[in-house]
Structure formats: structure tokens, C-alpha cells
Image: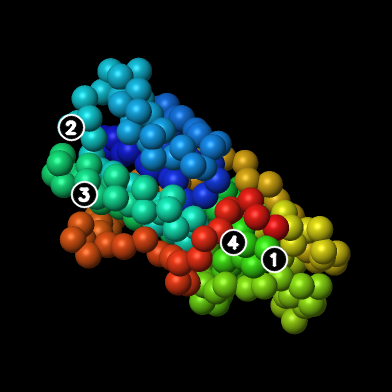
């Protein structure tokens, strides 16, 4: 049996959960980005208290490593690493893109398509990547400034399912029969499923050398900026 604490403060909504064998036992959310730091440790303590779980009984700590908000990533990563050192537990890091893609996959009924998570950066910029339906990367992660011609060379060949915070602003400027836009449904469960897979496989991160995945140099931005 595994008990994994999942921490996600990478974007506008912070999510914290405790999962048993990949299934959510209890979760908490905070929608005020500037309060993620104060929310996080109180939420963890409350989850453990409500579940009557002593924190040292956790099997591992998982954290969304990004990309996303610079400050949010620092909050989540430093908290996760600190808990791992204190509790002598393994660290699991999960890419923000794959969490979003895994959530989207459950909403897709076709056998051949592309999933394109987009994380809102600033103005019309997003962090993005493309996956096939086996969640294999089709290109390298990148920062992209969206316009009416974005993805035209790909979307002519195959349906693309856009998801994530950045997809909302792309939907406002892009119209194509092969373009589908999905709302994020259950990011909490998506992360828990992925962290459980890594736990079973024994894929852990080095506590002394792990850093957030910023994708590009720090710029002050809000995940809700347009």
C-alpha cells in the first residue's frame, strides 16, 4: 500500500491531496495564487488530521515540477524537498504538461489524435508541448506566442485536443474543425495516478539536485494574464 502526498502549486489553483494506491482519499484547493505559500502547510496538516494519518506514515511526496508560475513552483518544490528531508521519504516530480494531458486523455474517444496542453504565461504566450494518445512526446516543450496561424501545419493532418489554462485564450482566436478545446476536469486525480506509477516503478528524484522546470528564464507573470 502506498500513501502519497501530492503537491501542485504551479499555477493559479493550488491543489494538495493524499492518495492511497493512486486513489484520492482527501484533497484541498486554493484559488488565490498569492496565498499558495500560506495555504500549503496548513492544508497538509489539515488533510493528515482529517484522515487520522501521521505524516511520517506517508510513503512519498510528489510535486508538480512545472512549468508554471515561478513563485508557485518555488513554493511547491521547496516544501516537497523540505518534507522529504525531514521525513526521510522519496521525492517524486511530475511534469505539469503530463498531468494536463493525462486528464485530457480521459475525455477523448477517438483512436488517433494529438493532445496539446497549454500553460498560460503572459499576454498571448503559452508553454506548450504535443503528445500522442499514448502520452508520448511529439516535440520538445516550448514557449510560444499564439496567433491565428499557430498549429496550422499540424492541424491540417490530425485532430488536436487543446487543454490547460493557455488553451482558453487560444480558443478565442482560433477556429478549425480539427481543433477541440477541453476543460480540465480532475487534475487532482490525474496527478495522483501519475505519482503512483512512478512510485511503483521506483522513479524518484535526487533531493539535492532537483529544481523546478521553468522552461524559460524568470519573468514576472500571472497565470491568468492575457
Which mark lies nearer to you, 1 or 3?
1
Q: Quadrant of residue 95?
A: bottom left
Q: How far is the residue under mark 4 from the one under mark 3?
A: 30 Å
Task: Give the farthest residue toward the bottom.
Answer: 153
Which residue in the protein does label 4 denote? 121
Tell me which label, 2 or 3, sits earlier in the chain. Answer: 2
Count of numbered circles on the image:
4
Q: Is residue 159 left or right of residue 185?
A: right
Which mark lies nearer to you, 4 or 3?
4
Q: How far is the residue under mark 4 from the one under mark 1?
A: 8 Å
Q: How far is the residue under mark 1 from the one under mark 3?
A: 37 Å
Q: Residues within 10 Å of mark 1 (few under 14, many from 20)?
A: some
Which residue in the protein does label 1 denote? 124
Can residue 178 be seen in this snapshot? yes
Give the quadrant of the C terminus: bottom right
Q: How far is the residue under mark 2 from the one under mark 1?
A: 43 Å
Q: Position of residue 22 (x, y in %)?
A: 39, 39
Q: How far is the residue under mark 2 from the one under mark 3?
A: 12 Å
Tell me which label, 4 or 3, sits earlier in the chain. Answer: 3
CB atoms at circles 2 and 3 under 8 Å apart? no
Q: Quadrant of residue 161?
A: bottom right
Task: Name which residue lies at 43% across and 45% down.
Answer: 8
Tell me which label, 2 or 1, sits earlier in the chain. Answer: 2
Can residue 21 be seen in this snapshot? no
Q: Which numbered dot is residue 103?
A: none
Label 1: element kind: loop
Q: Which numbered dot is residue 90?
A: 3
Task: Name which residue lies at 55% across and 74% down.
Answer: 142
Amino acid at each position: 500500500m502506498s500513501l502519497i502526498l501530492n503537491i501542485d502549486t504551479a499555477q493559479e489553483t493550488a491543489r494538495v491531496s493524499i492518495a492511497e494506491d493512486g486513489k484520492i482519499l482527501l484533497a484541498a484547493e486554493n484559488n488565490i495564487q498569492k496565498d499558495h505559500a500560506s495555504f500549503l502547510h496548513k492544508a497538509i496538516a489539515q488533510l493528515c488530521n482529517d484522515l487520522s494519518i501521521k505524516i511520517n506514515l506517508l510513503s512519498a511526496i510528489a510535486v508538480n515540477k512545472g512549468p508554471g508560475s515561478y513563485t508557485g513552483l518555488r513554493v511547491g518544490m521547496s516544501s516537497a524537498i523540505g518534507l522529504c528531508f525531514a521525513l526521510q521519504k522519496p521525492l517524486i516530480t511530475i511534469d505539469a504538461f503530463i498531468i494536463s494531458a493525462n486528464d485530457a486523455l480521459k475525455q477523448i474517444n477517438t483512436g488517433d489524435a494529438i493532445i496539446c496542453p497549454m500553460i498560460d504565461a503572459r499576454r498571448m504566450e503559452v508553454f506548450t508541448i504535443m503528445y500522442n494518445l499514448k502520452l508520448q512526446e511529439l516535440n520538445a516543450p516550448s514557449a510560444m506566442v499564439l496567433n491565428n496561424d499557430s498549429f496550422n501545419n499540424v492541424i491540417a493532418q490530425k485532430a488536436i485536443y487543446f487543454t490547460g489554462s493557455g488553451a482558453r485564450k487560444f480558443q478565442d482566436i482560433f477556429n478549425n474543425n480539427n481543433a477541440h478545446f477541453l476543460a480540465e476536469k480532475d487534475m487532482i486525480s490525474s496527478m495522483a495516478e501519475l505519482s503512483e506509477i512512478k512510485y511503483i516503478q521506483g522513479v524518484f528524484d535526487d533531493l539535492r539536485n532537483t529544481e523546478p522546470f521553468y522552461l524559460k528564464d524568470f519573468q514576472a507573470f500571472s497565470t491568468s494574464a492575457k
